[in-house]
Image (cartoon, rainbow, N blue to C red):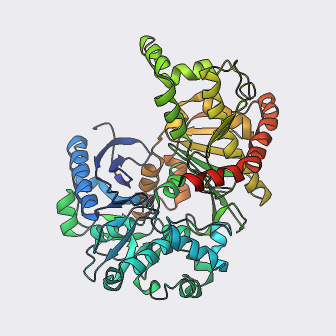
Amino acid sequence: MNHHIGPYVIGIDGGTESIRVGLFDLQGNLLISKNSPYDTFHPRSGWAEQDPEAWWESLRKAMAALLESAQVNPDEINGICADTTCCTVLFLDKNMMPLRNALLWMDVRAAKEARFIADTGHAALKYNGYGNVSAEWMPCKALWVKRNEPDIYQKAATVCEYQDFLNYRLTGEKSASINNASVRWYYDDENGGFPADFYDTIELEDLIEKFPSAVLDMDLPVGRLTAEAASQLGLRDGTVVAEGGADAFVGMLGLNVIQPGRLAFITGSSHLHLGMSPRPFHQKGIFGTYPNSVIRGQHTVEGGQISTGSILKWFGTHFLGLQAVESEKMKKSLYQMMDERAREIPPGSEGLIVLDSFQGNRTPLVDPKLRGAIWGLSLRHRPEHVFRAILEGIAYGTEFIFRRFRDAGYEAKEIFACGGPTRSRLWMQIHADVSNIPINIPRVQDAPLLGSAILATVAAGLYPSVKEAAENMVHVSDRIEPDQKNHEAYQFFVNQYVKTYDQLAGLMHETTDFIA
């Protein structure tokens, strides 16, 4: 570690399966990272819970491993910041102790409450794109607990998120992040904060008083590390703790997407598309825009695809057994080998169309009852055709979202991407070609972790602004330009993809209901 000179900052990423900590210098180099897992409990189908105490225990273990490997002096660590899953909801007593396990972001037990809230037609629902309300969001989960576990709800002095609980444990200060509050709690600080009449309408008139009263911008100091937290984590008492936010939105900072025209493309088992707009807009099929949720004065737009990398994994696991054996002999990864074969196939996969709605559609259709489809099959098609058609179908789904964005007057000029799928040059090229937008691949792919580090530098006074920190800490290592000829060839297939939903939606709904 000697060739790196402090000061350092630490980013903390509270993920779905584990907590991860990373030590960064002021140039944005990830010097070392460690993670420690925790369990998720599924008491019933669609339910997902975690024990908040396990988060703290995992943070302790990960931090101990980091400091042991890094051999840095805790005095050189000037700031820390966490991003976390969202909307992961806690019910805490007056001593800020959990009254029950946290409802994890992916918990959808509140489907009935989500329908009830959507049926009110309240103006605040503009943030959902005036459509269905997600059972993952704060009011739905809070209402479920109020209706089904009334004594827990009554006893709860504080209702908050993973983010807020962790910050409290670190600093002893109670606050909420403007990021979580704007993107999942319907908070609008340009128009009075929490919409009291909305919460009244949805039978949660007493919830606002249970929220932390301080709502802080990301990058502001929440407080300083308490002596107790410092001794448990091996850090310096009094270290500045910055306000963070939801992992993907903090990832925007780690991709340097802090000005209009740039779009964060966060890939993995799903795809998330996040951009900045100087003006607010609300439209069916678009989530947001959320005011001041990432950068003050900017509005954040959100789109998402539920199943992306997970479809490729499904195809690889269940249908490419022979190819897996072959790739092993060739000492290549299965996906690498399939990429090479799929590269030989022309755009459009010789007439194959794949719908990526294997688990429903998040945006722009907001339809949980849609399912996947593969059509246009002929005896000519081989596994690499289907493989390529999956890559293309997901890119068509992204373009479907971008078309909706453009209809609302929002256009991305360039994309900054992170996550596992960026390792496939072919897939990124297909995305660039389908949407006719260049794609940048930053060097540090752990964008939420780097985003947290960027926030920590600002709260600690090491950089004057997030903009300046991101300029100095985010470095692009690759750029993929769209191929104009391929872009034109793809337009027909994107249109076929969109028309397929119109044709099949009714059949899919009937079948999904029938087998439910």
Residue for point 28% across, 80% down: 93
Does 346 sit left or right of 332 as displayed? right
Residue 96 percent coordinates (x, y): 28, 77
The quadrant in which residue 34 appears is top left
Residue 115 percent coordinates (x, y): 58, 71
Residue for point 45% across, 83% down: 207
| Count of marks overlaid on the render | 0
Does 224 sit left or right of 116 as displayed? left
Residue 244 percent coordinates (x, y): 43, 63
Which residue reaches farthest front? 514
Which residue reaches farthest top? 329
Does 83 sit left or right of 165 as displayed? right
Instruction: Name the residue nearer the viewer: 510 or 424.
Output: 510
The answer to whether 41 is drawn above or below residue 338 in the figure is: below
The answer to whether 338 is drawn above or below residue 242 in the figure is: above
Specify whether residue 451 is in view.
Answer: yes
Residue for point 67% across, 72% down: 126
Residue for point 44% across, 75% down: 144
The quadrant in which residue 340 appears is top right
Residue 483 percent coordinates (x, y): 75, 30
- Image quadrant containing the N terminus: top left
The answer to whether 444 is drawn above or below residue 223 in the figure is: above
Specify whether residue 217 is in view.
Answer: no
